[in-house]
Image (tube, helix red, strand yellow):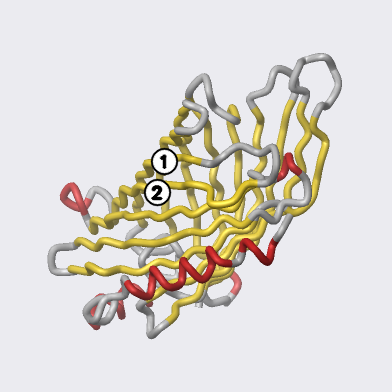
Amino acid sequence: MRLPQKVYPIVLAAALLIALLPLQALAEENAQSAMQGDKTGTNPINFTFDARLYNEYQWLNTEGDGNQNITTAEFRAPLLDGKLQFRVKARYLDISADLNDDGTDDLDDSGFGDTDIRFLTVPYPNMAKKLAIAVGLEVFLDTAEEDSLGSGATSLGPQVFCVFFKPFGGLFDLVAPAYQHKFSVDEDDGRSDVHQGLIDVFALKMSKDKQRWALINPTMIMDYENNTEFLNVDIEVGTMLDKYFGTKGHSVYLRPGFQIGADRLADGSVECGYKIIW
């Protein structure tokens, strides 16, 4: 794996996102103040300092028994006076799978997986119309220790999404449809190209005191390279912990999910996580 040759997408990501930065501040001053008061970490355009640790267990769609455990550490930070957000994710995976239903695990690996970074900005914030449009560029780095723990490719994933505040007469606090196009720019020998599209919808409902939330997040994954597709649906419930422990910006959540389609990678999953927002 030739990491020095794969660093250039990071530079490309930074250059493209800086070029897209708006000339004005992220939003009107009153809107910024309202968002800064939100410590749930559920608003995708609330650019705060953010540390998260979460673990996802997946029941894999294999002929025999198969499961995968993914532990992720994530950090987000605002840059350039809040006009840009930086995010990085690092993962540790443990996978075991009987691919042929012969009682033998064909995959039995653990170690660090791929790492990804993202730059995000909001070129169109219009709080008067309760609408914002965000654009970003995600870079997926080929850092996995084993072939089974990563894609074997360095990829770019430009994305765009809209955030609608209080849509449908206030039925939801926000709804955010998005599209990301992911493609590889460098592959390891013997590994396939990456060429995918992801259509994502995020719908959030907060409690009146803004201490608890529920959301639903369906995502359609379309693999153009392998001509496959499936639907992933996650449902999340979470709560702030501050009034119980005297902390500031601490919360926990539970996120079960399931996948639909013959090409699905997993039958179901459950994720639990801890967030600190400041």
Residue 245 falls in image quadrant: bottom right
Disc 2 + disc 1, Cβ < 8 Å:
yes
- Identity, as a three-letter code, of the amino acid under mark 1: Gly
Asked where in the image residue 39 lies, by quadrant, the reply is bottom left
Residue 243 seen in render: no
- CA–CA distance in space, label 2 to label 1: 6 Å
Label 2 SS: strand
Q: Residue at x 13, y 63 (%)?
A: 129
User: What label sits on residue 61 in the rendered view?
Assistant: none
Q: Residue at x 70, y 42 (%)?
A: 189
> Residue 70 at what x, y percent from top left?
68, 47
Q: Badge 1 local density, few (<14 within 10 Å), some, or many (20+)?
A: some
Question: Looking at the image, which is closer to me, 31 or 104?
Answer: 104
Image coordinates for residue 251, horizontal then vertical, percent: 54, 64
Q: Which mark is residue 180?
A: 2
Q: Is residue 19 visible?
A: yes
Residue 184's spot in the image, x, y percent?
53, 48
Q: Which mark is residue 197?
A: 1
Query: Label 2 amino acid?
Result: Gln
